[in-house]
Amino acid sequence: MASAAPKSTTAEETLSAILRNGIPLTGFMGVTIHDCNAEHLRLAAPYEPNRNHKGAAFGGSLAALAVVTGWSVVELACRERDLDAEVVIGRLDVNYLAPITCVMVSRCVRPDPETLKRFVDNFMIRGKAVMDLEIIIEGERSAHSVMSRARYVALRRKSERDAKN
């Protein structure tokens, strides 16, 4: 009897494991992948562990959710293109437009092919690439309760050989 081939892990499954196990804050916040497709990524976090003493979502939780959403988009782009990159946040600007008292759902549009090509080309030539993204968090009062813009940097990981030199 032939054994079934092992199931390969998708970039989305790897991302889910990183969010669950590799970034403790997202575990405490309860962050999960809500929807992931070629057009966008949506993450969700429950209200209760992310509320403040005023009865609304804590601004720090909202900022963290925005950072992780954008980071996830860039991380997925790198993994889907087999780039050995360390993705880091470079800058975050957040505008809190309306309080949120329900499940927080963040959304980031995935980059278009031309943007991705420039990103990959820069990474391959310089070992570094930058991507600017807009992240929106939905609330019950507005589909745009939180608007943020973030800059992410992908850096080529150093090999053991590079570390010795």
Image: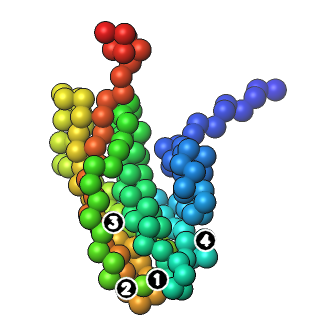
**Placement of 94 over or under 142, stated as above or below:** above
Location of the N terminus (image quadrant): top right
Q: Residue at x 28, y 43 (%)?
A: 153
Q: Residue furthest bottom?
A: 141
Image location of residue 78, percent across then percent down: 36, 40
Measure the C-alpha gap from mark 4 to mark 2.
Answer: 19 Å
**Residue receiving disc 2:** 98
Residue 134 numbered mark, or none: none
**Placement of 69 over or under 78, stated as above or below:** below
Of labels 3 and 2, earlier in sequence is 2
Of labels 3 and 1, earlier in sequence is 1
Q: Residue at x 36, y 15 (%)?
A: 163
Of labels 4 and 3, earlier in sequence is 4
Measure the C-alpha gap from mark 3 to mark 1.
Answer: 16 Å
- Kind of residue sitting beneath label 2: Ala
**Residue receiving disc 1:** 100
Relative depth, front residue between 129 and 117 = 129
**Residue receiving disc 4:** 49
Q: Are marks 4 and 3 in contact (CB under 8 Å)?
A: no
